Image (cartoon, rainbow, N blue to C red):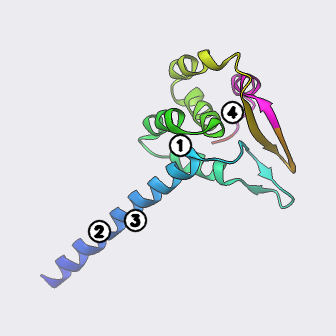
Amino acid sequence: MTHALISGFLFATLSLLAADSQDRSLDSLLNATHFAFGGVGFAGVTSQGERDYKEILARPSAETDFERVFQAGNVQAKCYALTALYKLNHEKFLQLALPLRKSDTRVFVMRGCVMSQRPLSAVIGEIEASAYSRQK
């Protein structure tokens, strides 16, 4: 009996921790400071945005989660969401990207050690040109 109670408690605790981790990744990605894939900064580390992107992409709920990121996130988050939706649901990507194709909204993009601001329309073009297709 005691063994069953302990097992049940551990299962419930691990489930809550997993849900909390998922929420942290979504919350973090909603406020991404820059859009980046590959090594960035002087140390060439993976950006927090890319780590969050990969964690969310691995979930069974990835498509729904990225639609939420697109709706609620900042412009960098929208770029991560569009990158995922390009792979997961191309029609949804086209639908969401259409009104942004002529946008002059600026996206903070990081490549290697260089941070720049690029037009959202240009980033969408890069997503369509499979610039990020090697990313998981």
* Residue annotated with mark 3: 17
Q: What residue is at 25 percent from the left and 74 percent from the top?
A: 9
- Whichever of callouts 4 and 3 sits on the residue coming sooner in the sequence is 3
Q: Amino acid at mark 3?
A: Leu
Quarter of the image that includes the N terminus: bottom left
Q: Give the alpha-carbon distance from disc 2 to disc 3, as whole Å.
A: 10 Å
- Pinpoint residue 18: horizontal percent, then vertical percent: 41, 60
* Residue annotated with mark 1: 57
* Residue annotated with mark 2: 11
In this rendering, the answer to whether 87 lies above or below 21 is: above
Q: Give the alpha-carbon distance from disc 3 to disc 1, as whole Å.
A: 19 Å
The secondary element bearing badge 4 is classed as: loop
* Neighbours of disc 1 within 10 Å: few (<14), some (14-19), many (20+): many
In this rendering, the answer to whether 28 lies above or below 68 is: below
Q: Give the alpha-carbon distance from disc 1 to disc 4, as whole Å.
A: 13 Å
* Residue annotated with mark 4: 133
